[in-house]
Image: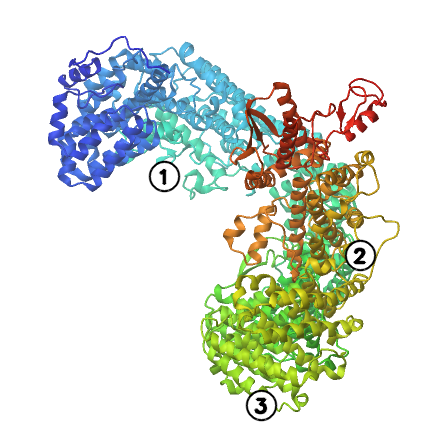
Amino acid sequence: MGRKQNPSQRTKGNLKPSSSAKAAELLEASGNAGGGFLGFGLLGSSAQESEEMDSSIDSDFAMVMKRMTKKDTITKLKAAQEFSKLCKEKELDAVGSALPYWPKIFSKLTADCDSRVREASNEALEQLVIRVRRSLAPHLKLLMGPWMVAQCDVYAPAASAARSAFSSAFSADKKAEAVGFCKNEVLSHIEDVLMRQSQPDPKMQAEEQDEIASRQVQMLGSALESLSLFCGLLQGKQLELMHDGFSRILKNSKFWKFGKHPSCMVRSGFFRAVASFAEFCPKLVVQFGDHVLPAVLYVLDESDPTVAPVLWMAVLHVITVIPDWWSKTNPKKGMYPKLWAFLKSGGYGSAALTYPNLLPFLSLLPLENSADRLLFFDRFFSEMKVGLTAQPVRQSAAELNAVVKAFMECVQFCVKQAFSPSSFDRKVIECLMMEQVVPLVNAAIGEGGSGLSRSHLFKDVAVLLAYIQRVFDPNGQNDCKTDASALAESVFDEVMEDFSRTVLRNIEEGNALSLSCVADFLRTLSPQPGEVKEFKRVKKTVKFCDAEHGSGEEEYTCEDTASHVREASEKSCDQLDQKTAASVSDVDKSNTKDVLKHETIDTAAVKERDIEDFVNAKSEISGRENSCESGLDVSQKQLVLKPTEKLLNLVNAVCIRSIELAKERKETGYLALFSKTFKAFTSTELVHFLINNSLRPEDRISFSDHHLTSFITDFLMPWMIEIQSTEECRHSTDTMDYLLEVVTVVWNMMDGKSKVGILSRLIENPVGCGRLLQHLVSSNCDKSVDQWLLGAKFGEFIVSVGRDLCQKSSDYDGREAVSGQNEKWSLMCFALSAGKNGEPKVGEEYLSLLLGIIHSFLPSQLKADDKSVDQCVSFVCDITFHFLTNLSDCLSVPSYEGLLLSIFQLSLQPPFLSEEVLEKVHSTWKHGFTIVLGRTGSGFTGESFIGKATLCLEESVYSKAETGLRLTQLANVAFEVLEVILKVHGENERMPESFVKRLCCRFSDSQMTFWKGALIADREVRFDPQDLLGSAPASPDVVPKCVTPVAFTSMFLVKILSLRESPVREKISLENRGNNETQISDSPLEGKNCDSDVIPADVKVQTVERLLSVDAGIFVDIALGLAFCRAVLRNQGVVKQSSELVVLESMFEKNLTGLTSGLPSDVLGIVVVDAFDRSLEKGGIWSRGLLVILQRMHDMQFGGNRVDSVGGLDRFLPVTASAVDTLRVAMPFFEVDHVLQMADFSLAQMISFPSDDVTEFLEPITLALTVINTALSLHDHHCSVKSDAFSHLLSATLLQVNDWREHRRSIFLFDSHFSVENWKLVAFNLEVMRLFTLAVTKFPTSLDSSYWDTVLCSAVSWIQSAAEGQTSLTCDMMAMTFTCGACDLLQAIDVCMQFVLPEQLSSFPPDILSEWKDVFSGAAYDVLLPVFMDVAEKASTTRVITQEFATMLYHLSSAVVHCSSEILLQHKLKLRLVADVDTNLPDNLQTLLNYCCPLLLSCHYHLQLAAYRLLLKIIPDLPKYSEKSSGVDGNDEAEHGQCPLQSLMSVIEAANLGIKTSLDDATFGETVVVEPFTPVFTPVMAYMFSWNVLLRFFKMSSSERRVQYAQWISERGVMDQLLQNAFRFMPRNPVVALKDTLVANGASKKLADSRNMFADDPSSEVRPTSGGQAAVHVQHLACTVYRRTLETLPAIVRQWWTEQDKRVAGIVEKFTARHVSPLLCARELQTIQETSGCFANMTIKVRPLTREVIANYVLEECNMELIITLPANMPFGTVSVESGNRVGVTKPQWRSWVLHLFVFLSFQNGSILDALSLWKRNVDKQFEGLEDCMICFSVIHGSNNKLPKCQCKTCKKRFHSSCLFKWFKSSANSACPLCRNLF
């Protein structure tokens, strides 16, 4: 893009101004620079003027105003906005300094092409005038012209801003004065804009030219609009002074061309200006009439909807002020064709705005000749009817209504004028009525449903007929001549006959829409008020009235034709688009309301009076529907279309024929026609006529009151029964509704006795008449009928109806069965509702009986999948709610209580009901509870209603161990009951507290025996085996019954706590509660919701705290429940996340956290003290509850001295078992001094016992030792203070224990068996084990050699004792507990020796590590390993084991995995070999494999982990045994692969079979989450563990063996199975999954963000794992196996990938490239970089960013460089091998080496480092003089790294044996590849 070449370059130093600047100076010199129109060029000014402005104006304003003159739009916009800001902020003097320069800039900005700039400039003007006020006057003349034009800007926001500025500058009474002051300047500016439009510079770009041209058009429209505004603002004398100026504009031919301008904005402005001239300067319009009349009358066919209304306004003004306008034009050639086109098109879509002007226009036409008038009317109305078919009219109801309205108004005017004495015209009347009106009505009826029938046509025709009837009716005001009266009667009769023929013809045709039109038409002719379909008209209509009757805002008066013309036009124009009309219509209408009155034509006044007379007649009929709409005085006598004989005959014929056809054709339309006609013309004569018509002529009788009863019973009721018997009409409500309307009309005409007779007859035969019965009794207002309803006859009937309805409602097809009972349901609702004074409508005896039937119908027990129950419950709820809502005295019925309690009990049962019905149940009982509690008082006793409801709730809670969802359901119900109580009784009553206290469920002493199961699960809690005999084992899947009530209580209290935060509002369905006519299909509980305040708004915090403090001890029970769940779940291998105990634990923890956070401090203190008291009294599990409380208080930082708060350390003395349990959980929260004091006291007590008879004091010694161990365990917690004190405590304790070991060895179970009798010894040894464990883990450097000897010797001895009791480990709990303690001690010692001692070697005894490795470690693990294998095999045979046994497995597994590889390789397990399996491994290794591999398939997670850890320890020693020959020669090895490890492969095959059985249907790429306790969990873990071990073995094997193993894997298809399974178990986003796990395990968020599942191996520690953690562990293992597979076997994976279909290959590549490939590349490059210095003669460099490896081989004069580039989707992409420098090597040789390297990287399972090593060896051998193998062209074989040794005897070439074997096999010939001789 280069710079444009400008042929006219300016010369440097040329000061001559440009043409635009010069033109600006000329304009300024001529005096127009300030206020004239400056055009659309840049604003130019001289340098001198700029200097003057800079020196006299504020600097900020000067800078902003200079920016306003720039060309850039954004610059101008921001400058204008900144100008506004400166006007607000600057001082008044600074603002005034800018005022002289503002008019010129403002004039330019108002002409800017950008609308935003214009809007901003007007806003700036407003801020300026607000500040300067009167200082604006000197500059007003320069400013007013652009200001006036700006107020009419086509951009509405800009115009609005200008008008706002104008209003801010001048008050309402000063605006006209201000405009008059500047009138010449304003007119001059407008004239400049109109007449001095310049053409755009042709040198401008096309876009700029179009923009300027568009802005010129907009300015023309604004100027013309401003001209109209200008005329309206000027006063009378000022208008006369402007006559010459206006004449100057009108004389210019350009002005008259604006009427035909292409732009609608210009044309609209032109016609508005003409209308303003005609209104305010009529003499001027008369003077230029020759130009004005053609300009407006010859363009009546204007089609633009924004121009047409303004045009018609101008037309009416012009023909009003020019008296002889008719003679100055040629209407037939110039006006009529345009008018016909306008009418024919229906107003071109603007009829709603233009057609109201037709009546004034018609009234001003001087049609004096009768013949001309007839021809004109015929053409005029014919074209209007054609316009009704125009597309815009048909598509818009508003347009159609406007055309019809105008048509009928014009017809009415012409008919009235033709009937007037002065211009009576028979032909006009007949022509209009018979040729225009009648065909139009017939078409409207015949079309049926068309827009005509929905318009005002029928009503206007009725008005017209009423007027004609008044003309000939002798009882009316007949001022016409006899000829007119006769003509009116003749026309009326002829019209009615024509209408009758049309109506009857359409009835026979039977079109439904036509029948509806007939009904609507007849109702408009009815003398009775009725509902007639009305179209929603535009509010501003055209109406006429006499001045003496008043006039509304939208009416024309006969005072002045010009006045009503202008008002009609203004109403049309007010509805124009804002863009074209808002700028004029909204400017100071207060100044334009006083309209000048001009001379009118006498003929116009006469016509106006004719219009007024006719409209009076019209309003007399229409006024009964909307009297306020017509604007007439409704007090005047109203005329009604009287029913003449022809009309009544038509009505009788219509009724009779519609009845006959309805029965014959079974169509609803005829019923509707009959019903509407009967209602419109209701009379006893019509009833008598219909009865006699149904009888034979000889049976017809005269009318009597009995006819009304007979009409219902003998005429209508049989018809109803017949209708209901048909299937089609049974489900149609409209069919019956029409007949019920007729019945209602007749019913209201009857007396009470007749009504009772009809009702009695109906209940005797209710079949088919149920709806009629309900309708009649509901619409009753007669006392005799009320008495009948309370009687026995109706009571027995309604009871039978209720019984039948209950039976039918239980049908399986619920809705269909119930919907057929709509009539009975309505009767039930009626019976259960209240009368006028609130009393029952049915006798109480029958009402109670009815409720009893309903109650017995309610199911007592819900069942799943019982669909009929929903219908039954829904029906009962509807009935109950209706009864409670509509009967104020409902509690007087005895059976209400049982019914309401039964419904309440439904909400307590399992949620087998649908959500809709269940919500209905809740709404019903809550509404009932509200009513009952509000009327029965606040007593809370067992016999009270609320007491019985609470008892039902308690029974549901205590009935059985419920699930978490059921507990939530019951807690919600209890909370809803409490809400109702609080709503009714408020917070000051005792009932809420009693209710809460009743539902606080606590543990009783009788239930404490169950906690023994939890004591077994948590071995750290002291227990006595004697007490545990017969106790049920604790299990995560079994929840005791005594736990769930406490869980319910916790949830209930949390609900109460929620009241504290905000008042609870709940939505209850209440729709149609009081509707007696509600049907069963639309039950009262189905529908919209309405708010109901459940809790008053003034509920205080104290209320909630009082409710929560009703029983403070309940919080200890909640903590106890949480402690139980934790105790059972502790030490579990894998716990199912969905188990009930896990759900309860989460529930308890969440609820306890919320409750304690909301309790006041005094209540919290009470809770803590109560927890201590119960723990000190009972110990055991209550101590675990105390721990939960103390942990929660610590988290809340609810501090204080715990010892002092419970009464000091004396509370724990003497040291009993319960006190020790309490101290173990409470001491972590004590201060360090109290901890040491308690430990010193226990140590003193322990030492004080005589050493001669220690056995008798074992129990108190054990208790004291427990306290000391607890204190020592807190060393890390208090390590910063008094560390020496803890060390001294340990030393003293160890000294005493060592003394006992030397002198009282019998109390240590070193070589004895267990029994129930020596439990005290077991407990003592457990505490000693714990002491030694604490010493090793927390004080390892404080132990001297003697203590270490004691610890190590004791540990080995205890392990040996546990091994001696091996036979009882699966059943004896003492043996299991003892084994757990010994394993923990052994594990602690091993961890210390492996990790702690090497880092602090100087702090330990000198030979302790060697002694451990050489003596103690082997002695311990040689004993423990056989025990573990034996126990593991027993556990593997049993899928379900006790929790105690699972705990022991965990501790055994945790200890045995620390066994070193040396001890494992020298194990003393029994020999276990498999027959017919030939392996290269020694028997001891094969035996260990045969023990460990089957454990991978164990169903116990801890055993799988332990076996996996043991296998990882021995894997490094296996490859060296596999190197030995397996008895197969080299060729066979090359042909057949070798199985890596048969034992592992057997596990893989078995696990894969289990996975395939469970997940065979899973598609590739679909992630399967493996949850614990599922059948697939065990095989998946075994599969992943086995492959992880196998891949490690593969990587550690030699390259020759790797080739054989890889070949075997490829041949068996094992890789496909592995990758298929891996992609099943890997998560889609391994980063997020691992992040969640790390955070859950306590890792920092930063660390979690930087890790993914492929970066590190999963943890293999044996530890308790939740179900969610186990599922993530499976995913992590799958990711690790997949990564190791890609690292170890890339070629096999790549081959598998290429064989997959496109979808699978895409999934694999995308996932790998995103998550794994970057990690593989980074690790590969890091490995190369770490070993780069290990090669002689070759250096390796790494470029991580480009994934490049550069190898440079240098040997003497040879220099070779290789560049290897790793692909981004490694290993699927191709590795790029490029050559760099190459010196001293031939090109063919180099190509051979590069190709060989590329082949290795692509097809061998090796790393980049392996490839470079092989390539270097090849190069080295080449330089050593060895020849290549002539088959693979390599010295070193790529698979087995062998040299070519097989030599041909003929050609003497050497070959690799493997290459030669493949050659022979593929060629089927044993010839040499080169010489072709036999080899």
- In the picture, measured across the screen, residue 247 lies left or right of residue 532, that is left
Look at the numbered disc 3 and give the secondary structure of its residue.
Answer: helix
Q: Which residue is mark 3?
A: 1248
Of mark 1 and mark 3, the one earlier in the sequence is: 1
Image quarter hosting the N terminus? top left
Tag in front: 3 or 2: 2
Color style of the picture:
rainbow
Q: Which residue is mark 1?
A: 550
Of mark 1 and mark 2, the one earlier in the sequence is: 1
**Is residue 1081 placed above or below 418 in the rendered structure?**
below
Q: Which residue is mark 2?
A: 1487
Name the amino acid, label 1: Gly
**Is residue 1419 placed above or below 762 in the rendered structure?**
below
Of mark 3 and mark 2, the one earlier in the sequence is: 3
Name the amino acid, label 3: Ser
Q: Residue furthest right?
A: 1476
Please give the name of the residue rendered at 25% of the width and 22% of the height, measured from the top-left corner. 281
Where residue 90 appears, as percent x and y from the top left, is: 18, 40
Please give the name of the residue rendered at 75% of the width and 77% of the height, measured from the top-left corner. 1031
Look at the numbered disc 1 and give the secondary structure of its residue.
Answer: loop
Tag in front: 1 or 3: 3
Q: Nearer the viewer, residue 754 or 158?
A: 158
Where residue 1214 appears, as percent x and y from the top left, is: 57, 88
Cα separation, mark 1 vs mark 3, equals: 121 Å
Q: Nearer the viewer, residue 779 or 1297?
A: 1297
Where residue 77 appears, as percent x and y from the top left, is: 29, 30
Examine the image and state in which quarter residue 1826 appears. Answer: top right
Q: Nearer the viewer, residue 383 or 65?
A: 65
Q: How many circles with numbers are drawn on the protein?
A: 3
Tag in front: 1 or 2: 2
